Amino acid sequence: MSRNTQPKQLLPLVRRAGAAPGSPAISLLEMSAGRLDGLVPPERRYICTGEQYRSAVLASLPAFSEAQILGEPAARDTVNAVGFTAAVLAKLDKDAIFAVLTADHVIEPEDTFRQRVELGFRLVEADERRLVTFSIKPTYPATGFGYVERGAAITGVKGADGFAYRVARYVEKPNIQRAQAYVESGLFSWNAGMFVWKASTVLDCIKRFKPESYQGLMKIQAAWGTKDQARVLAEVYPTLPKISIDYAVMEPASQDKQVQVCTVLTDVKWLDVGSWPSYGETLPADAAGNRLGGSSTPETTIVVQGKNNLVCSADAGHTVALLGCENLIVVHTKDATLVMPREKAEELKLVHGALREDLK
């Protein structure tokens, strides 16, 4: 359903908690922006995204101004998206503290989420050396997530008791054996991919752990707000080394004494909608465990002698019929159809890699 021109964050896939049956679906981006209400003032919210998505993002969220969209001229992974944002915010306010909240999660209840993010801000305000992560109690030994090992509890900050801890270890995407051991230990949580930190602190970490990125980011920062802003961004950003914030900064920082990596246990229902099974968890199931997503309806989606299937169609008038099928994922759009066993969902990138570029 997602394409290079329309990523999943812009697809109308989810419904707000408590929404009436049959209510229109909204995008993950819209849901994520609404989650900030009462936490961060609208004028202090920014979206870092691919420049090619600027118009689509503004159409989806008209309350944002052009200046609140930080458009990347090329995809250079999360260390540079974070560093770009930090460089801009640090130039606007040398004392800026900001949260990094990715737009591909379903999080409930939102009130609890806002309380934990507020705690993250208080932790950094109390000690600007802190890099705060948010972690979720694991429900299975996932190999696609990073893991955070909790260390000593943090005290002396309002709301920290029972929720805030030093990070003893930060491990990115372990194999199944290690993931199983981490879950069984009770000391590890999933890294939610969300953070709070001071802009200057995370820039200093990038300087020490990924200096090649830092040098380019400083050129972008120096030109920001000048007539050379667009030119320097377009010239420099695509040359930055492509690597995630987890590998580039968080893993080495967790063993570094100049910063203090912390985590806030975030007691919410958290779904990283990064796969079709995880998307299925946002949908109600019938008595046989079958789930319908997108524009699929019981009138146009027929499952006979089947169970635990996920069917998602973008065409309300198109009939999809399954007979004797179990644990299948079937996705239909006007120009593509996907059929796969649920257990193969983690390997879907193999299909993407086999597609011609013009079909992606």
Image (cartoon, rainbow, N blue to C red):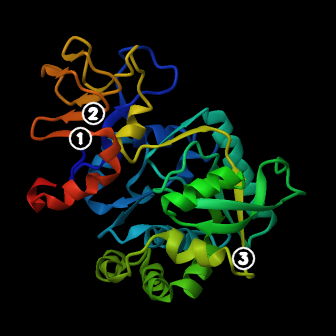
Looking at the figure, which quarter contains the C terminus?
bottom left
In x, y percent, where is residue 179?
Answer: 56, 57
List the residue tagged with mark 1. Answer: 340
Residue type, numbered disc 1: Met
- Left or right of residue 329, residue 168 in this image: right
Looking at the figure, which quarter contains the N terminus?
top left
List the residue tagged with mark 2. Answer: 328
- Front of the two marks 3 and 1: 1
Q: Quadrant of residue 349?
A: bottom left
Residue type, numbered disc 2: Leu
Count of numbered tags: 3
Secondary element at image label 1: strand
- Left or right of residue 25, residue 312 in this image: left
Q: Are marks 2 and 1 in contact (CB under 8 Å)?
A: yes
Secondary element at image label 3: loop
**Residue 97 appearing in the image:** no
327 vs 226: above or below: above
In primary-sequence order, the first of circles 2 and 3 is 3
List the residue tagged with mark 3. Answer: 259
Q: Nearer the viewer, residue 221 or 174?
A: 174
Q: Residues within 10 Å of mark 3 (few under 14, many from 20)?
A: some
282 vs 90: above or below: above
Spatial separation of the CA atoms under disc 2 and disc 3 = 46 Å
In x, y percent, where is residue 350?
Answer: 23, 58
In x, y percent, where is residue 64?
Answer: 43, 48
- Residue positioned 90% across, 57% down in the render: 156
Residue type, numbered disc 3: Val
In primary-sequence order, the first of circles 2 and 1 is 2
